[in-house]
Image (cartoon, rainbow, N blue to C red):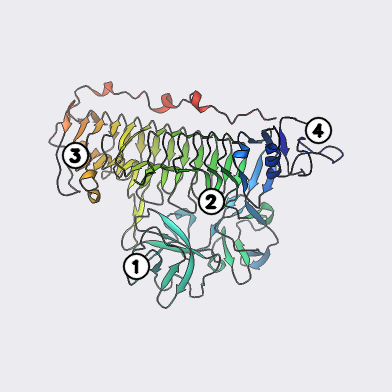
Amino acid sequence: MTTTDQTAFFVSTKGNDSWSGRLAAPNAAGTDGPFASLEKARDAMRASDIDTTYVRGGTYRLNKTLTLDSHDDGHSFLAYKSETPVLSGGERVTGFTYEGKGLYSAKLSSANGLDVSIGGVRQHAAQTGDFNPDHAATSGWHVLKANSTGASKTSFNFTNGDIPSGLKPHAGLVVQTFDTERLKDDISHVKSIDQYHHTVTLDDAASYGLRTGGTYRVMNDASLIRDAGEFGWRASDGKLVVKPEHAASFQSDGVVVARLGTLIKTSNASNVSFEGLTFSDTRYDGSALSMQGGHGNSVGGNHFVNVGTAVSLDGTDTSRIAGNHMEQLGGNGVSMIHAANGNRIYANTIEHIGQITKGGAGIGAVGSSNTLVSHNDITDAPRYGVSFKEWDDGQLNRKNIVEFNKIHNVGQETADGGGIEMLGRSAQNMGSVIRGNEVIDTGGLATDGKGNWLADHKGWGISLDDLTSGVVVRDNFVKGFAWAGIYVHGGDDNLLENNFGIASRPEDAFIRLEWVPKAGAEARPHDNMVIHNLTAGDSPINQYWKLLSPGRLTMDGNVAANGRAYGPNDAVFNPGFRDSAHADYSLKDHAPVLSHGIHDLSWSSMGTDGYQADSSMAQFWDHAAY
């Protein structure tokens, strides 16, 4: 019996846009049934009082972005019952011809990019260096050299033999570059390769000057394919060439080339809901779900896989992103920019982030305030787990809360990143809170001026970077960090209280405070409080706390695992300043006395006691589907 619902429209892969859309399945006569497209359902909701569309299971291959605006306020696109509707921005490629040596090719209408999957698994673009997936962070990169005029953002020199002499620029050929600190990578099309002068010129400028010791790799040419799981574009005959791991089944498994950057885009749309959908197969440089303006939107219980950035909020306020699973991401998990304020990002699983671009975050924001980031599981990211930045350009971060998140194995391919970062170039009081988070294994990777790898380099657990001030860091557990578990870089009036850290190496401090000499006197920290923190490891007590021109601070009741402490009760430690930014103030002259005892420390906010949702974080994605 065919179901009719006067309060909802339906979309199905068996539908027809000439039908009414009121039936969940085609009727027996084949004269009526669900719509075939989301566009038709959108238009039907606009023309009626119905505000809900149920999307049935199956794959919907979009050849253009579904756009929503204020005409769609209050509308919902929901998965039907327990079915799995998949929105794909990819081109399904068939008709491969075997070429020998494990290689297969198929004609495409235009060059593929870096997002190719087989059976839902991302493949690796062939590259000039020999890539080893067991050492993905460090293998396959060449050392670049500054050109004859010094560091440049548009060209670099390479060592003879690193780039094959027959390799020529074409529509698919790109180069990925990294500065030595690996702060941000850039991907650009190759404008020219000069084998005589050993120079590569880029179509687009890099973010940082390309200096000697930085790294690069040229990608996506079929002639560079070595191992199974790689692909490349062959410009001579317009074909995608793949070397599948499972040759017998790869075509039936499905070869997909991402074409769209964005599947759904909202512009000034409010109170719109997306629940239970799968977003897949979009380019690394796009956002699968892009929201610009509007407020009160809900994104819950969705699956984002093999996309660039899962969800971006551009000036979108008071919206909820919750209960989603985001994985195999070319870019970021959730991105917020341009005063995207008052949003709640919670209960998401975000894993395998930055599989193509490396500078992003599981959850990242620039110029966003009153935001809650809570109860998320974030794992396997090349730079940040969570990052809130302000660059002192009017995009300020205020009153954000980052709490009760599990953040593991991040910062694995870059330096100066790690678990949780707040960056506050304005030096104004943020009024933000970082509490109750578990941050484990925060990496840190860079190269020196000769291109040698530097492991465990600036892999902060929690970082208050570049003048970040007025932040409470309380009840966090940090382990597996490099250089410092909690880092204060030039900011004032921060409270570091009741945190627990395990230092794995003697050179890693649990808490580190220092000034930013290039920013002048303003960047000398003042009035920070470091109280009642507990640390463990094999280091002497004074090595857990690294104070480099820390200014005036209160440091009291901090305990090492052996029961020794630093900080006379209610005392203010004020060593003053020195000219050198590297002056390390020893604690040996200050008696490690804990006058009120370790048993007075409160750990009740840590662990499971703090992992509780409240009424403001309703599990709205558990909707009663039709």
Q: CA distance from mark 1 to mark 4?
A: 69 Å
Secondary structure under tag 4 reads loop
- Quadrant housing residue 55: top right
List the residue tagged with mark 1. 146
Per the model, the C-alpha gap separating discs 3 and 4 is: 74 Å
Please state which amino acid type lies under the numbered disc 4. Answer: Thr
Going from the N terminus, do you reach mark 2 or mark 1 first?
Answer: 1
The circle drawn on residue 2 is: 4
Q: Earlier in the sequence, mark 3 or mark 4?
A: 4
Q: Can you say whether 558 is above or below 281 in the image?
A: above
Q: In the picture shown, does residue 207 fall above or below 288? A: below
Residue highlighted by disc 2: 286
Q: Which residue has dot 3 on it?
A: 551
Q: Give the image location of residue 510, x and y in percent.
A: 28, 38
Where is residue 64? Give x, y as percent: 64, 51
Q: Is residue 467 left or right of residue 157?
A: left
Q: Helix, strand, or loop for circle 1?
A: loop
Q: CA distance from mark 2 to mark 1?
A: 31 Å
Give whichever of discs 4 and 2 has the lower sequence position: 4
